[in-house]
Image: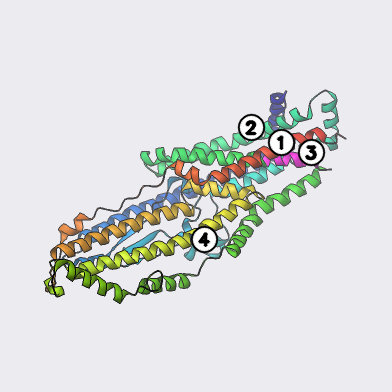
Amino acid sequence: MIFRIARKEMTEMIRDGRFRVSAAIVFALLAGSLLLGWHHYREIRAQHIAAQQATREQWLKQGNKNPHSAAHYGVYAFKPTAPLSLVDHGTDPYTGVAVWLEAHKQNEFKYRPAQDATAVQRFGELTGATVLQLLLPLLIVLLTFNAFAGERELGTLRQLVSLGVKPSDLALGKAVGVAGSLLLLLIPATIAGSIAITMASGGEETAAALPRAGWMSLGYLLYFGAFIGGSLAVSAFASSSRAALIALLGFWMFNGLIAPRAASDIAKSLRPTPSAFEFGQKMELALKNGVDGHDPADARNKKLEEDLLKKYKVDKVEALPVNFAGMRLQEGENHGNEVFDHAYADLWSVFAQQDAVHRVLALAAPGLAARSISMGFAGSDFPQHAHFAKAAEDYRRMLQRTMNADLIRNASNTAPYFAGDDLWAKVPAFEYTAPAANWVAAQQTSAFGILALWCCAAVAAAVWTARRMQVY
């Protein structure tokens, strides 16, 4: 019975010109967003590869110089763009695409596209995620608001019930019918997206993106299921199709337009982030006086000198068998690393707590959970930005250790020292491996749980209201 009802619902929807027009518009927007995303991804990927090769070439051909000068010369690390980011750009336009890796500093990321965006671009950008999170739920609302209320007004609902059709079967059949109609739209879009990803990236990147795409698809299916079940429940409960439409459009606006902004404001008010000036000033003070404020740089350098003189049993720096400048620089790096780890751990903890606020508020708006899952598996959320930042910082520290170690071993304490291409070649090129899909899935466990809760609750509500609805 359920599948007969589903087939009847699908047939009616496909024959309905309003559905065909609405579906065509949504599909055109989704295809257009994927095309734009494909063009953007190819462009950014080509720029990233060229820039990474250029910075590597500059490092290898910088000529003879003191290793510490080379450490200040530094290199750039460019954050690669994940293939699925053509669907969801996430936080990428706001977090920056490159970071300069130099001595003594853990620099902020540069070149944030959002800073150069026009007013229209800041308002919103057409992406696949925008269509999936906003427009498809709107299409579901338009397909289901009169599923029960409309049939009640026409008198056909009483006839169906009088023929012995169970209201619960009717609700499940309508849900399957709506889902089947949406699949007619989503399957071609998925095929188009897969082709776009394959064309934009290499075979290995496409294969690595498949598990992420599967997890992302699961998240969106739960999201759509929540909207289908909830919309049917409202249609069964509402006194008229007009009342159902008003209620559903109100929830759609709250979920897709109001809740994301409200969640950001609430998270910032509960866990405010320091300004860039405050953060930088606090870090400068810690670099100068230590994390606890009682470990000044002069005292540290004096103690290092005394320890080295005592260890090598000499009475002046010039007599040391190791280069004192290199030892002092590496000690400064170790101190700086401690400061950076402490400062950024605090900052990222604030971001994690803000993200937790978003997860809690997703109990009131499933779009927040869907948004988190989409960005996560697209590789464009903040945890994966932090993962890249950690990899870049580890590379910076390795580079500094290599330069300082060469100074310590080979430079004297009385004459200038210069290194050449052999030393620069000892530093391997920066390579970054994005976390696996399972790592992202672990990060998104609560979001999946909330969406599953929404989906199950919505379907249960649809069945419950259908059993208790008025049929006339």
Left or right: residue 209 versus residue 29 is: left
Does the segment drawn in magenta span residue 235? yes
Which one is earlier in the sequence, the residue at label 4 or at label 1? 4
Q: CA distance from mark 4 to mark 1?
A: 37 Å
Of 451 and 344, the residue lying toward us: 344
Q: To which residue does mark 1 refer?
A: 460
Q: To which residue does mark 4 refer?
A: 350
- Residue 272 location, quadrant: bottom right
Does the segment drawn in magenta span residue 118? no
The residue shown at (48%, 65%) is 115
Q: CA distance from mark 2 to mark 1?
A: 19 Å
Disc 2 + disc 1, Cβ < 8 Å: no
Q: CA distance from mark 3 to mark 4?
A: 43 Å
Of 391 and 21, the residue lying toward us: 391
- Is residue 113 in sight in this rendering? no
Of 75 and 85, the residue lying toward us: 75
Q: Please rate how many residues cluster around mark 1, counting C-alpha atoms within 10 Å: few if below 14, some from 14 to 19, many from 20.
A: some
Q: Which tag is nearer the camera, tag 4 or tag 1?
A: 4
Q: Which tag is nearer the camera, tag 3 or tag 1?
A: 1
Which one is earlier in the sequence, the residue at label 2 or at label 4? 2
Name above or below for residue 242 compared with residue 355.
above
- Residue 143 location, quadrant: top right
Q: Which span of residues is magenta-colored?
A: 227-237
Which one is earlier in the sequence, the residue at label 2 or at label 1? 2
Position of residue 384 measured from the top left corner of the image (x, y, whole percent): 44, 51
Position of residue 349 measured from the top left corner of the image (x, y, whole percent): 49, 59
Secondary structure of the residue carrying tag 4 is helix
Q: To which residue does mark 2 refer?
A: 180
Position of residue 131 measured from the top left corner of the image (x, y, whole percent): 58, 47
Q: To which residue does mark 3 refer?
A: 236
